Image (cartoon, grey):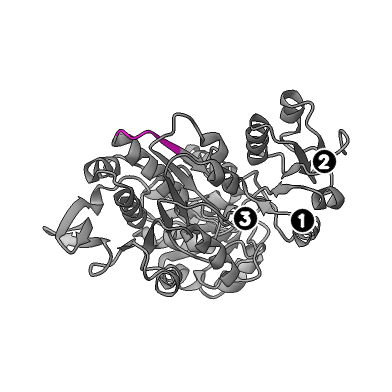
């Protein structure tokens, strides 16, 4: 459906979701001629568009290749691949395709911290934002997490913008130049979008473009290789969970393991890791400390936040305990790497609930960690058979038709002092609205188990 005649040389915004609406508002405010396009017949933002901008032309139900080829520029939704035929044709004709983050980068008025990685980026983004606020800085936090980047732009300018960025957002971002940037880790993800792992890694690596200070996880071979191969002359801080490497590391002090800052002139124990609350992982705490150091946050404020920050919902969040069994919601684990981290972090035997939409991932890396830490695995969702192919003969496998069934079976299989861990290693869209919905259903099912 097209609501009015198209004008040549419009900026075309692809997608009427939250990001698309933010782009519309920004461009209209800046007097740009825009056209909106979404291949869904009734996209989520259509009602808002008609109410707020009734004169803006739009196309729904399909992608109009002719209009796209005539555009001045295309702003692509993160959920859309540049390989979409109509977009590929426009790109071949020389039409620029950019992301909302690229538009943000062209107008940003304060330093930016940029955070990506396969796992942990929402936690680190939120944690660093709290650290900056504790230090008295005026800060805007968002991006892939919560508020679209364009909606963060404000006058007077803040002291700092802190952005969580996905690989999808980075694909079409060219001029972002963060004051500090981190790739927290790399694990196989989104292999239904990328040709191979190397293409996914190269997309993540775009966050390091520019001349700001790099934060490098030297425990991750893919990230460490970027420093060695591409950025040996850039300024950087490193972090590591080992005792003998990293500017920010875990190191023994007075009989305890501490988050520690090491430089050529000082050795500064900052906080015992036993004082980290909730689901906050030491690696994420170290990354946030390194980012904060890179932009000049006082260590006292950062440490004060670490003593109270409890992590985010659906990320290794403790739900309840029944007869000595912990129930833990890690629904945000939408890839294999996240599930491996969750399993490894629990110092007890686990009944794992896993499965969903696998996004083309290889589940083989689960094999060793499941063999070491799990008593059994309850499988749910579309790609449960693919996980079963890897874990057959590793642990006993069970299948559940629903989350309630999975929780009931897991509770029966668990021993006292075990944990029932929802950490799916898969996306949620085969059975749920999103990972939050999946986590909520899990927590409701745990409550029912508790009440019975």
Which circle's residue, 3 or 1, is located before the other in the chain?
1
From this view, report whether residue 72 is shown above or below residue 50. below
Residue ID at (44%, 62%):
185
Q: Confirm whether the magenta stretch covers residue 373.
A: no
**Picture quarter containing residue 438?**
top right
Q: Position of residue 225 (x, y in %)?
A: 43, 73
| Res. 87 mark | 1
Please identify the dominant SS of the magenta region.
loop
- Visible in this render: residue 252? yes
From this view, report whether residue 367 is shown above or below residue 359. below
Label 1 CA crowd tier, 10 Å (few <14, some 14–19, many 20+): many
Please report the bounds of the magenta region as a residue range. 136-140
Q: Position of residue 342 (x, y in %)?
A: 43, 58
Q: Which residue is mark 2?
A: 60
- Using the numbered discs, state the Cα–Cα distance from disc 3 to disc 1 in whole angstroms: 12 Å
Q: Which residue is mark 3?
A: 172
Instruction: Tell us which disc is closer to us: 3 or 2.
Output: 3
Front residue of 442/282: it is 282
Instruction: Tell us which disc is closer to us: 2 or 1.
Output: 1
Q: Position of residue 196 (x, y in %)?
A: 62, 71
């Amino acid at each position: 459906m097209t609501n009015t005649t198209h004008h040549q040389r419009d900026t075309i915004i692809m997608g009427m979701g939250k990001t698309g609406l933010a782009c519309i508002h920004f461009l209209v405010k800046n007097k740009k001629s825009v056209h909106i396009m979404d291949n869904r017949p009734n996209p989520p933002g259509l009602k808002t568009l008609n109410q707020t901008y009734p004169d803006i032309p739009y196309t729904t139900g399909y992608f109009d290749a002719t209009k796209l080829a005539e555009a001045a520029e295309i702003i692509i939704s993160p959920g859309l691949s540049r390989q979409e035929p109509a977009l590929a044709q426009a790109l071949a004709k020389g039409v620029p395709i950019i992301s909302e983050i690229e538009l943000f980068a062209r107008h940003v008025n304060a330093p930016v911290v940029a955070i990506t990685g396969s796992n942990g980026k929402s936690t680190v983004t939120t944690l660093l934002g709290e650290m900056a606020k504790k230090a008295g800085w005026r800060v805007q936090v968002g991006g892939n997490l919560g508020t679209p980047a364009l909606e963060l732009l404000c006058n007077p300018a803040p002291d700092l913008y802190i952005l969580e960025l996905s690989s999808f957002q980075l694909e079409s971002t060219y001029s972002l130049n963060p004051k500090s940037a981190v790739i927290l880790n790399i694990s196989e993800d989104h292999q239904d979008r990328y040709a191979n792992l190397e293409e996914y890694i190269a997309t993540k690596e775009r966050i390091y473009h520019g001349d700001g200070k790099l934060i490098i996880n030297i425990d991750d071979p893919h990230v460490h290789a970027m420093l060695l191969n591409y950025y040996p002359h850039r300024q950087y801080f490193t972090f590591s969970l080992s005792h003998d490497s990293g500017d920010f590391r875990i190191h023994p002090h007075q009989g305890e393991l501490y988050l520690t800052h090491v430089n050529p002139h000082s050795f500064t124990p900052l906080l015992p890791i036993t004082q980290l609350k909730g689901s906050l992982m030491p690696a994420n705490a170290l990354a946030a400390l390194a980012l904060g150091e890179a932009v000049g946050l006082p260590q006292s404020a950062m440490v004060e936040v670490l003593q109270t920050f409890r992590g985010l919902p659906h990320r290794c969040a403790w739900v309840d305990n029944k007869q000595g069994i912990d129930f833990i919601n890690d629904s945000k684990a939408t890839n294999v790497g996240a599930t491996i981290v969750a399993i490894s972090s629990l110092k007890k035997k686990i009944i794992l609930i896993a499965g969903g939409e696998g996004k083309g991932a290889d589940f083989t890396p689960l094999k060793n960690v499941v063999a070491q830490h799990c008593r059994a695995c309850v499988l749910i969702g579309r790609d449960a058979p693919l996980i079963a192919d890897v874990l057959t003969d590793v642990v006993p496998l069970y299948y559940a038709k629903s989350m309630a069934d999975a929780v009931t079976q897991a509770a029966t299989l668990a021993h006292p002092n075990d944990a029932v861990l929802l950490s799916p290693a898969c996306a949620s869209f085969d059975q749920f609205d999103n990972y939050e919905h999946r986590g909520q259903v899990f927590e409701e099912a745990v409550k029912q188990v508790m009440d019975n």
